[in-house]
Amino acid sequence: MELRALDRPADADAVIDLAWRACRPHPQWVPYYLRADRRRLLRGEYAFFRNRGVRWRGFGLSDRDGRLAATATAYVDPPLQRHVGRAVGFVGQYEALPGVDPGPVLQAAHEWLAGEGVTEVWAPVNCPAQTELGGMLTEGGDRTAPFFSHWTPPHYAEVWEPAGYRPIQRFHNYVVDTTAPDLRDRLADHRRRGEANGVRIRFLEKREFDRGLRVLAELYNATFDRHWGHGPMAVEEFVELTSALRDIAEPRMAAFAECDGEVVGFRIGFPQYEPVFRMLDGDLPWHKYPRLPLAMRRVREGISLIVGVREKARGRSIAPALSAAVYEEMLRRGYPRVVHTAIFDDNVNSRRQVGKLGGVRDQGWTVFGRDL
């Protein structure tokens, strides 16, 4: 195996090809992205990378035919370092074939990060961490992960501790059974409590989608400021990274809460688009368009992606009222369950909120860390 830096024009496509070769044999895997979008991300073609001065270096192991067998990218995000007050770097975009020792790739990434002044590494964490998150699936890998969650082969989680890492953060999805006989009464109670506290719910309007994204970006910065691994990002950067969601957003599943004329909270949900992305398989050429309606009819569940409430407005039943509003549309569609994604184990408030809906802990992911 030859170790080299990934600095060739075709390397982004080679990384994507490796992901397909490593994961495609597993029926649980669904690529929840298009190859074109992933290519832009790997090449750092978003303003997020330019404006923040993000530095990165990819490394790969190539076989005798020159095809990648293992790869990882080291990242340094200076604004995030300043926000968390630590000289932390990331190792992300990890892919590897089974039976391949990724040690040389990880060692090269560590040496590069050390040369950039990094003293602590989190992995696997992709960049931007605010939208890409990371982690390896360590619980429930026998099942497909839902939309916006990342399924990884079992051997992906086995490389970190031998490389000197230890678990530093865990998060889980939670499943709510929407057929529970008392759920509708609980949702109605949540709406009433919110209204009694002066909470007004409004939904995203597609004709004002860009404006809605900007409001969401401002709320994200305000409500996730102290969450692990998160840090503020410019509104325009957030909009550029998430604008592709326009095509799949459902207005009645994106709710904003207002109190005294100010937007103070949000909850964003989606249909569980697994059948759609399984059919797309990373590409949307013209000949797949006729198959989209059939794939959409196979959508049978919903997901709750993210919720946030400004600190000064907490304690007014805003998050439960937002849940009730989004759940109304999911119940109207007859979804028998809703998956709340990526709730950190140390986020007591979010765990309490999903518990009020009857949420049960499901698949889990682990983020690893080590000192350099």
Image: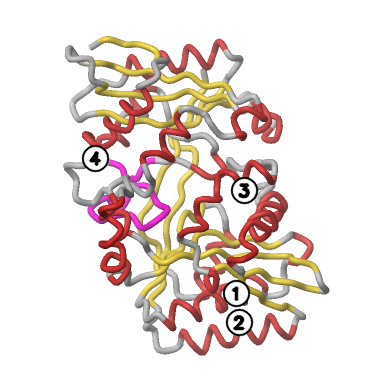
* Helix, strand or loop at mark 3: helix
Task: State the extent of the magenta-drawn residues as a range.
Answer: 136-152
Category of crowding for the residue at label 3, using alpha-carbon neighbours closer than 10 angstroms: few (below 14), some (14–19), many (at least 20): some
- Which of the two residues, 86 or 280, is positioned nearer the viewer here? 280
Residue at (32, 36) in percent of width and height: 157
Residue assigned mark 4: 23
Q: CA distance from mark 3 to mark 2?
A: 31 Å
The answer to if 143 sits in the magenta stretch is yes
The residue type indicated by label 3 comes to Val
Of the 4 image quadrants, the one containing the N terminus is top left
Kind of residue sitting beneath label 2: His
Q: Secondary structure at mark 1?
A: helix
Q: Residue at x 46, y 65 (%)?
A: 270
315 relative position to 176: left or right: right
Give neighbour class at mark 4: few <14, some 14-19, many 20+ (Cα, 10 Å).
Answer: many
| Residue 66 numbered mark, or none | none
**Mark 3 = which residue?**
239
Cα distance, mark 3 to mark 1?
Answer: 26 Å
| Mark carried by residue 320 | 1
Q: Amino acid at mark 1?
A: Pro
Residue projecting furthest to the right = 260
